[in-house]
Amino acid sequence: MRQFNTRLSQLLVDGADDVKFTAHNVVSACKQQKTGKAVGADNVAMEALIFGSVKLYVHISLLFSLCGRHGHVPDSLTNHSWFHWLKTKPGIYQI
């Protein structure tokens, strides 16, 4: 949590309450993700974000900045499912 707060304070613009995400922030976050994951509810593979173009990163940063500025995240961006996997034996998983 401390690391999150530190990064969030770095994104604050001139001490204002506006949060500004840059394309560099988005590129940095995308490059840290792992490949080979299952797609989510939006059917977007992580590889599409990791190997995306500059235009994609700019548009994502604009979207996140607008969400931060207006204090609202669209419902379509909050759809997610959690599955708890239980490992019973090496290589065998159950839901």
Image (cartoon, rainbow, N blue to C red):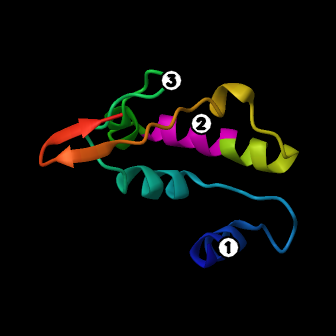
Residue 74 spot, x, y in % from top left: 74, 30
Along the line of sight, the residue nearer the viewer: 18 or 91: 91
User: In this figure, which residue is indicated by the disc labeled 2?
Assistant: 59
62 is higher (above) or lower (below) than 48: below
Q: Residue at x 59, y 36 (%)?
A: 59
Give, as a single range, the part of the protein colored magenta: 54-63
The amino acid type found where label 1 is placed reads: Asn
Q: Is residue 74 left or right of residue 55?
A: right
Relative placement, left or right, of 65 versus 45 is right
Label 2: state its secondary structure: helix
Q: Is residue 15 above or below residue 39?
A: below
Does residue 41 lie above or below 8 as drawn? above
Which mark's residue is nearer the viewer, 3 or 2? 3
**In the rendered view of the protein, which quadrant contains the C terminus?**
top left
Q: CA distance from mark 1 to mark 3?
A: 28 Å
Q: Which residue is mark 1?
A: 5
> How many neighbours does mark 3 have within 10 angstroms: few (below 14), some (14-19), or many (20 or more)?
few
Which residue does the numbered mark 3 point to in the structure image? 41
